[in-house]
Amino acid sequence: SEMSLLKKVQETSKKYQLIQAGNRILVAISGGPDSVALWAVLLELKDKFKLDLHLAHINHKLRGKDSDKDQEFVRNLASRYGVEFHTVSVDTKKLAKGKKLSLDEAARNIRYEFLGKTADKIKAHKIALGHTQNDQAETVLMRLFRGAGSLGLSGIPIKRGEFIRPLLMVTREEVLEYLKQKKLNYRIDRSNLRADFLRNKIRLTLFPLLKKEFIPEIVSTLSRT
């Protein structure tokens, strides 16, 4: 049978030394499926590894009331589990305009800066992000389309400095299956305002085509690449 998501994460963590006993981990949560699965799996490992978990959420103000509801959703998660909640609200559109950045770049800068500062403040050992194998595959293709040579064709690192990505060997399908089994709720990004349109096109148009016509296991193949 398929290896469980929990077991996969544990093996990934061991192989790349992502999580050590006694770690204080700042968990970045948008409220979407990937980050909720990340949160749930770290909760499952909490006692075994004596983890001190903190939640972080960035409200990018890109989807009006929906953005505020995402923030509330994560705030409630934190209070339900009695963990500290760290959050910030930033007008990403305004910032992007002011600094002449794409929405995607602006959002990423805000995210990493806030997470880094918060981790320093609470003396966290790690910052956990919810990227999956699907994000990895999309990133590799995006870099290819934007003309990266083989040197530039790197993917998302599983570990860089204090940042760790425990779900990077897990597919989005596995995430959704796990959430279903655990009966966990999550927020859906209705506007599909994934700030990066190329990524969106790859996800919604290209991958389904490649899967159907050429290579069913496109996601794991690209991830290995």
Image: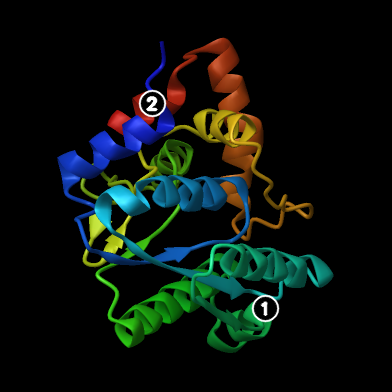
Q: Mark 2 = which residue?
A: 220
Question: x, y (%) of residue 53?
Answer: 40, 65
Secondary structure beneath label 2: helix
Q: Amino acid at mark 1?
A: Lys
Q: Is residue 87 left or right of residue 70?
A: left
Q: Residue at x 49, y 68 (%)?
A: 55
Report the colour scheme: rainbow
Q: Mark 1 = which residue?
A: 93
Q: Would you say residue 84 is visible in this rendering? A: yes
Above or below, comparing residue 5 to residue 123 in the picture: above
| Most foreground residue, 199 or 34 | 34
Q: Amino acid at mark 2?
A: Ser
Above or below, comparing residue 80 to residue 17 in the picture: below
Question: x, y (%) of residue 108?
Answer: 48, 69
Q: Residue at x 57, y 67 (%)?
A: 78
| Most foreground residue, 97 or 108 | 108
Question: x, y (%) of residue 214?
Answer: 50, 12
Label 1 crowd bin: few (<14), some (14–19), many (20+), radius 10 Å: some
Q: Earlier in the sequence, mark 1 or mark 2?
A: 1
Question: How far is mark 1 from mark 2, CA to CA?
Answer: 34 Å
Q: Residue at x 46, y 49 (%)?
A: 38
Question: x, y (%) of residue 169?
Answer: 35, 35
| Most foreground residue, 109 or 7 | 7
Secondary structure beneath label 1: helix
Label 2 crowd bin: few (<14), some (14–19), many (20+), radius 10 Å: some
Q: Residue at x 29, y 30 (%)?
A: 224
Q: Would you say residue 158 is visible in this rendering? A: no
